[in-house]
């Protein structure tokens, strides 16, 4: 007969196994539940395509395409961002909803364009752009994610040295590459919270997207203001022109002088439009610099730029790119001037271009003026002969002398003009003005001649 013996060890083992299994099940359920809650409620994720325009450089890389249109289609990064708004609503209240903050990246639509920018101002903040820096509530900001210090300049919506307050439920956003970003400074304006669809908190960016950020310990010092390398900039311009089959530009001190005159006038008058009353035109600046070329042009830029930044800024847009690639330009000069514009400290870069092309007068124009000159020379002796008729001359001396004087003046003026036309040389401003005047002199001469011939 066998006797059954109770085994405490087996019971304990069974209890331990059962408990462990229960704990594992509970942990698994909790873990799965937490992951679902985390992924779909707390932080629902979405991958956002970042185009290669360079507006968020250095956080995201620039594209390698040639044109802006192709860069807009080129994807250079796909950050994992959080859908916004996150959390959930219950009984009219919001739970676990994140608050957007300064430094967060946000994606949104501006018109029909999907953009990704960085929040600089939250509701209630007072924003001011001054001296290349962003001020929030009168405090200058150190921004490690910008490519260079002192690189922020104002726009139509947020002019420099003008304080603007971020309204309720809105945000002030900027691209990290301040020289190549359309953002709240321009037509994007304030971004309404309802238009934001994803965000990435500043803390979540660190360790992943901060590899190209920089040290900001000296950002507020004047010594960190960006200096333009003129030689490097001109070299970049010439390399672009060579690729496009255009001649290199020669640097001219005279154009640097004329550009300086324009920059100083802009600071004094506050007028960028050279046609505005009180402004010195580019042509007038050339004259004051003692220089003349038939082809000339100007690009004024406000802000602090490195040579790379200025080149990329001008080459980014078709209008300015086509301008600097003008085949008729052969010379360049630029001025970098710091001063106060409308009581706002800033820097102006004025670039002057010039070139020489022959006037290429048409044959009919040359023949017309040449024939007039010949005719004046032919009739001149006849009028001088009138002086020999004493009685007639004494009676009409004033009119005869006037006719002879007009003929001599016209011959003296037209001889160098016709000579220049035949040699395909440009006429001076004085000579061009004379051509407009000659018709009235001809009418006066003809009226006097008709009067005398009728006697």
Image (cartoon, rainbow, N blue to C red):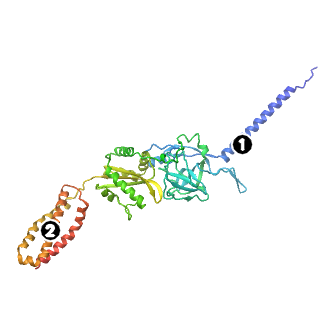
Tell me the distance, in whole angstroms, between the alpha carbons under discs 2 and 1. 105 Å
- Vertical placement of 12 versus 254: above or below? above
- Vertical placement of 211 versus 293: above or below? above
Give the residue pinned by disc 1: 33
Q: Nearer the viewer, mark 2 or mark 1?
A: 2
Q: Secondary structure at mark 2?
A: helix
In the rendered image, which quarter contains the N terminus? top right
In the rendered image, which quarter contains the C terminus? bottom left
Q: Residue at x 39, y 59 (%)?
A: 265
Picture quadrant of residue 408: bottom left
Q: Secondary structure at mark 1?
A: helix
Q: Position of residue 79 (x, y in %)?
A: 57, 44
Which is nearer the eye, 401 or 89?
401
User: Which residue lies most toward the right here?
Assistant: 1
Give the residue pinned by disc 2: 407
Which is nearer the eye, 44 or 224?
224
């Amino acid at each position: 007969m066998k006797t059954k013996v109770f085994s405490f060890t087996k019971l304990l083992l069974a209890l331990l196994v059962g408990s462990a299994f229960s704990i594992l099940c509970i942990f698994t359920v909790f873990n799965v539940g937490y992951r679902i809650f985390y992924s779909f409620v707390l932080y629902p994720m979405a991958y956002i395509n970042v185009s290669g325009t360079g507006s968020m450089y250095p956080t995201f890389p620039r594209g390698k395409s040639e044109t802006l249109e192709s860069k807009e289609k080129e994807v250079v990064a796909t950050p994992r961002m959080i859908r916004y708004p996150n959390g959930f609503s219950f009984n009219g209240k919001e739970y676990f909803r994140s608050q957007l903050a300064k430094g967060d990246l946000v994606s949104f639509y501006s018109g029909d364009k999907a953009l990704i920018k960085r929040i600089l101002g939250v509701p209630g903040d007072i924003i001011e752009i001054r001296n290349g820096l962003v001020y929030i509530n009168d405090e200058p900001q150190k921004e490690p994610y910008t490519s260079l210090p002192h690189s922020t300049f104002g726009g139509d919506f947020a002019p420099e040295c003008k304080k603007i307050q971020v309204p309720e439920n809105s945000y002030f956003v900027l691209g990290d590459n301040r020289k190549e970003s359309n953002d709240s400074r321009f037509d994007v304006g304030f971004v309404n919270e309802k238009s934001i669809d994803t965000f990435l908190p500043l803390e979540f960016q660190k360790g992943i997207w901060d590899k190209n950020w920089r040290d900001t310990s000296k950002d507020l010092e004047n010594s960190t203001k960006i200096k333009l390398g003129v030689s490097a900039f001109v070299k970049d311009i010439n390399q672009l022109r060579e690729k496009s089959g255009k001649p290199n530009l020669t640097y001219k001190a005279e154009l640097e002088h004329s550009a300086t005159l324009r920059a100083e006038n802009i600071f004094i008058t506050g007028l960028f439009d050279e046609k505005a009353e009180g402004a010195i035109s580019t042509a007038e600046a050339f004259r004051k610099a003692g220089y003349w070329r038939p082809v000339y042009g100007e690009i004024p830029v406000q802000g602090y730029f490195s040579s790379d930044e200025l080149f990329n800024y001008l080459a980014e847009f078709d209008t300015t790119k086509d301008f600097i690639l003008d085949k008729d330009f052969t010379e360049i000069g630029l001025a970098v001037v710091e001063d106060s514009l409308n009581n706002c400290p800033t820097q102006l870069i004025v670039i002057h271009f010039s070139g020489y092309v022959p006037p290429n007068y048409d044959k009919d124009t040359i023949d017309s003026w040449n024939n007039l000159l010949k005719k004046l020379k032919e009739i001149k002796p006849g009028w001088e002969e009138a002086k020999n008729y004493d009685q007639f001359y004494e009676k009409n001396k004033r009119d005869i002398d006037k006719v002879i004087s007009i003929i001599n003046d016209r011959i003296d003026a037209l001889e160098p003009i016709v000579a220049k036309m035949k040699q395909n040389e440009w006429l001076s401003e004085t000579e061009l003005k004379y051509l407009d005047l000659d018709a009235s002199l001809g009418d006066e001469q003809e009226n006097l001649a008709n009067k005398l011939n009728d006697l």
